[in-house]
Each structure stands twice: as structure tokens, then as C-alpha cells.
Amino acid sequence: MRSFLSAPVSVLGIFVFSLFVANGAWADTALDKSMQQLGKAYKELANDLKQPDETKKSEYLALAATMKDQAKAAHDLEPKLAKTLPPDQRDNMTASYRKDMDKFAQDIDGLSDALNQAKWDDARKLMETLKQDMFSGHKQYRVQKHHEEPAAQTPATNAPAQ
């Protein structure tokens, strides 16, 4: 006989699991944790700026400050991809990563200025710039997980296509 408490206990378990994932409890590295916290602040601010409210400017600035703090922390960390490269390539990649993180932090400073002055259109444009920077940074500096597809077969010979 199942207890009537089993459903609430299951829901509680899922909720606790979600909190661990959302808070980065299972992030692999310090860089992963910083990036997750930065991403969380970014998403919240992006949603808030869809319909900005002058009375919430201090909250927006706090989110931008979180982004900046996490970007500064991430700057000094080494991406996992660097560990897979030969030393000469690793040094070049790490230098490029740090240069890009410096630019990213400068863009966050510009965002903070726009927020402070309630220039909402400028803030949204800078958020879009930051979004593009994040996408290109992930593509360039993150270990990519490739899902290889099998080679196409020619119907007549069942051999790989040339």
C-alpha cells in the first residue's frame, strides 16, 4: 500500500535536485560555477529589461555587479579546453581568453553606466553584445561535445559514400 505522503516527498526531492542544479552544485570547475552565476544574473537582468522600472534600478545594478564579479573571477581561471592543448597553444589560447574576458568586463561596465543613467535602450543593446560575446566565447573556449553521425551509406553497395 502506497502512502499518501509519497507524492509530496517525490515533489520535494525534485525541488531539492532542481536547487542543486540551478545553484551550480554539480559544476565541474570554479570556472563553470562562475559562468553559471554570471549566466543566471544575465538572464534575470535580460528579463527585467524587457519592461524596465526606474524604481528597480538598484536591483539591476546589483545584477550587473554580480556579472562583473563573476567575469573578474573567471578571468583568472583556465578553461578546460586549455588543458587539452599543447603548452604553446595553451598559452596563446589562455591569453586570448583573458583578453576577451577583459573586453567582456568593459562591456559590463558600459552596461552599468547605461543602467545607472536609466538609458534602457542602450542597456538592452549592451545586453545583446554581451550575449553574442558569451556565445562566441563558449564556442571558442569551451570543450565541445560532438555527436558524430555515421557515414552516409550508398544504397547499392552499402558502402560509405565518397
Image (spheres, rainbow, N blue to C red):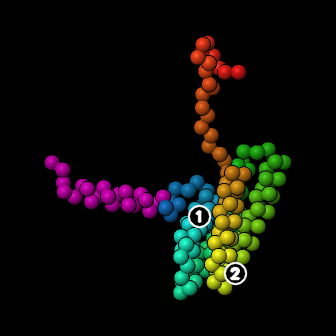
- The x and y percentages for residue 133 are 70, 61
Instruction: Find numbered disc 1 in the image and state the secondary structure of the residue it sits on.
Output: helix
How crowded is the residue under tag 1: few (<14 C-alpha within 10 Å), some, or many (20+)? some
- The x and y percentages for residue 3 are 18, 54
| Residue under the point 66% across and 21% down | 161
Q: Earlier in the sequence, mark 1 or mark 2?
A: 1
- The x and y percentages for residue 146 are 62, 40
Q: Is residue 159 magenta?
A: no
How crowded is the residue under tag 2: few (<14 C-alpha within 10 Å), some, or many (20+)? some
The residue identified by callout 1 is 39
Q: Nearer the viewer, residue 17 or 104?
A: 104
Q: Main secondary structure of the magenta part?
A: helix
Badge nearest the viewer, 1 or 2: 2
- The x and y percentages for residue 108 are 69, 73
Q: Nearer the viewer, residue 50 or 42?
A: 50
Quarter of the image for residue 17 reads: bottom left
The residue identified by callout 2 is 113
Q: Is residue 13 magenta?
A: yes
Residue 12 visible in the picture: yes
Residue 80 visible in the picture: no
| Residue under the point 66% across and 47% down | 143
Residues in magenta, as a range = 1-21
Instruction: Establish if 122 lies above or below 20.
Output: below
Measured in 3D between alpha carbons, the distance from the residue under mark 1 to the one under mark 2, in whole angstroms, is 20 Å
Indicate the amino acid at tag 1.
Gly
- 20 left or right, relative to 1: right
Quarter of the image for residue 104 reads: bottom right
| Residue under the point 65% across and 63% down | 131
Instruction: Establish if 145 lies above or below 128.
Output: above
